[in-house]
């Protein structure tokens, strides 16, 4: 068995060098002993060990020795009963750092240190950090395997262990961490940028809408200024027909200042102007007073955000009362009652009843 003690690899884990890859190296653990029942050599091999992050990646072989009196090797008076060289210390995890345990065995001349996990963890292992332990090989194995080996030694069985480098496991590389961090950061930036663009786009469109509404109001004021305004006299047909204002529902009286719309409906000036500034249409027949004042166009991409688009240039038309008969012929009433009313106003002397609003 002497040739098995020759180191297979003497390089240290690259974790020790700043900026190098953090690689977890696994170990093949071979445990051999002579069974007291059959007097035969039992050999068990498993890929169940993990090299410490500060351990040299090299092979180690020897008899397994337990610390005394503390299996955790955390006391200052720890000793190992060594019967032959080389030997490997088997220490239980807990109560003190991995480095303290390894140094305690190292001072006694151990060629390697095997730390087995705490109770209740099964055969789970975890990475060990143990700076300042020099060239001593250190691995961790599971609690089940470590407890079985410790029980064999306590029963007087001589146990031998052969530790070999298996290969890298993981990897846990700074490059991989950088890639993941950059990916997360990039996704976050993209999402935030998307929402920022959406917010600014909507703010811009709302601003444009307010500007267009102000311009539309100016156009409406321009159109209202062109409407015919007159003061009702005693002989005015509006008074003789007993009409009423459709906005305030009050009857017209002599001396009232009224506004005539191109559709020939009459309203109080103080009633209809605020209405037209907001709605731009006749309250009775929905005639649009902005016809001829602005041109409308729709942008497919802005349908969601704009009710209308105003052309940059406002077209100044001829007086809106010219050729009223032609406009009237082209106009279609939405309410038959209003159509009947208009016919009555066009044919004076014909007896008909109108419904006043």
Image (tube, rainbow, N blue to C red):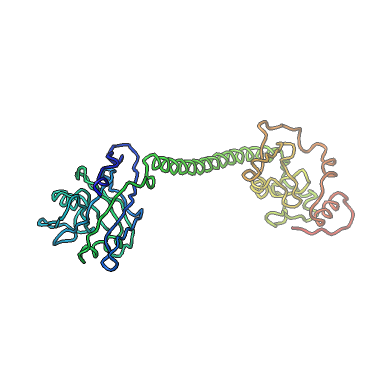
| Residue 281 coordinates in the image, percent (x, y) | 71, 47
**Occupied quadrant, residue 303:** top right
| Residue 259 coordinates in the image, percent (x, y) | 72, 45
**Occupied quadrant, residue 8:** top left
Q: Is residue 76 visible?
A: yes
Above or below for 109 versus 158:
above
Along the viewing direction, whichever of 162 and 69 lies nearer the viewer: 162
Q: Is residue 118 visible?
A: no
Q: Residue at x 87, y 58 (%)?
A: 352
Quarter holding the C terminus?
Answer: bottom right
Q: From the viewer's perspective, is 320 left or right of 24?
A: right
Q: From the viewer's perspective, is 36 left or right of 221?
A: left
Instruction: Identify the residue at the far left of this view.
Output: 77
Above or below for 74 versus 188:
below
Q: From the viewer's perspective, is 175 left or right of 100?
A: right
| Residue 26 coordinates in the image, percent (x, y) | 34, 49
Along the viewing direction, whichever of 317 and 33 lies nearer the viewer: 33
Along the viewing direction, whichever of 156 and 114 lies nearer the viewer: 156
| Residue 103 coordinates in the image, percent (x, y) | 17, 49
Above or below for 116 versus 264:
below
Q: From the viewer's perspective, is 82 left or right of 317?
A: left
Above or below for 75 versus 313:
below
Along the viewing direction, whichever of 119 and 237 lies nearer the viewer: 119
Instruction: Identify the residue at the far right of this view.
Output: 350
Q: Residue at x 70, y 38 (%)?
A: 297
Q: Residue at x 69, y 54 (%)?
A: 247
């Amino acid at each position: 068995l002497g040739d098995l003690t020759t180191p297979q690899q003497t390089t240290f884990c690259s974790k020790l060098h700043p900026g190098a890859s953090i690689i977890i190296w696994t170990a093949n653990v071979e445990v051999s002993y002579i069974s007291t029942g059959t007097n035969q050599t039992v050999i068990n091999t498993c890929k169940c060990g993990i090299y410490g992050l500060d351990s040299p990646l090299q092979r180690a072989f020897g008899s397994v020795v337990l610390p005394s009196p503390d299996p955790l090797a955390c006391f200052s008076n720890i000793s190992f009963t060594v019967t032959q060289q080389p030997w490997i210390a088997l220490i239980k995890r807990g109560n003190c750092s991995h480095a303290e345990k390894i140094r305690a065995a190292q001072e006694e001349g151990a060629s390697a240190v095997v730390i087995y996990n705490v109770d209740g963890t099964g055969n789970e292992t975890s990475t060990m950090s143990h700076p300042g332990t020099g060239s001593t090989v250190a691995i961790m194995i599971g609690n089940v395997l470590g407890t079985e080996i410790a029980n064999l030694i306590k029963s007087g069985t001589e146990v031998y262990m052969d530790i070999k480098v298996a290969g890298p496991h993981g990897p846990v590389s700074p490059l991989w961490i950088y890639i993941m961090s950059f990916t997360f950061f990039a996704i976050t930036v993209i999402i935030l940028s998307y929402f920022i663009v959406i917010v600014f786009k909507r703010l811009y469109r709302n601003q444009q809408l307010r500007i267009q509404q102000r311009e539309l109001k100016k156009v409406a004021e321009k159109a209202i200024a062109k409407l015919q305004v007159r003061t009702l006299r005693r002989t005015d047909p509006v008074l003789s027909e007993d009409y009423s204002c459709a906005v305030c529902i009050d009857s017209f009286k002599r001396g009232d200042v009224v506004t005539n719309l191109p559709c020939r409906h009459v309203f109080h000036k103080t009633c209809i102007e605020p209405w037209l500034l907001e709605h731009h249409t006749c309250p009775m027949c929905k005639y649009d007073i902005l016809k001829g004042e602005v041109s409308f166009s729709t942008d497919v991409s802005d349908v969601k955000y704009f009710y209308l688009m105003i052309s940059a240039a406002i077209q100044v038309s001829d007086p809106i009362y010219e050729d009223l008969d032609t406009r009237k012929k082209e106009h279609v009433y939405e309410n038959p009652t209003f159509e009947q009313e208009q016919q009555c106003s066009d044919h004076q002397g014909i007896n008909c009843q109108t419904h006043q609003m």
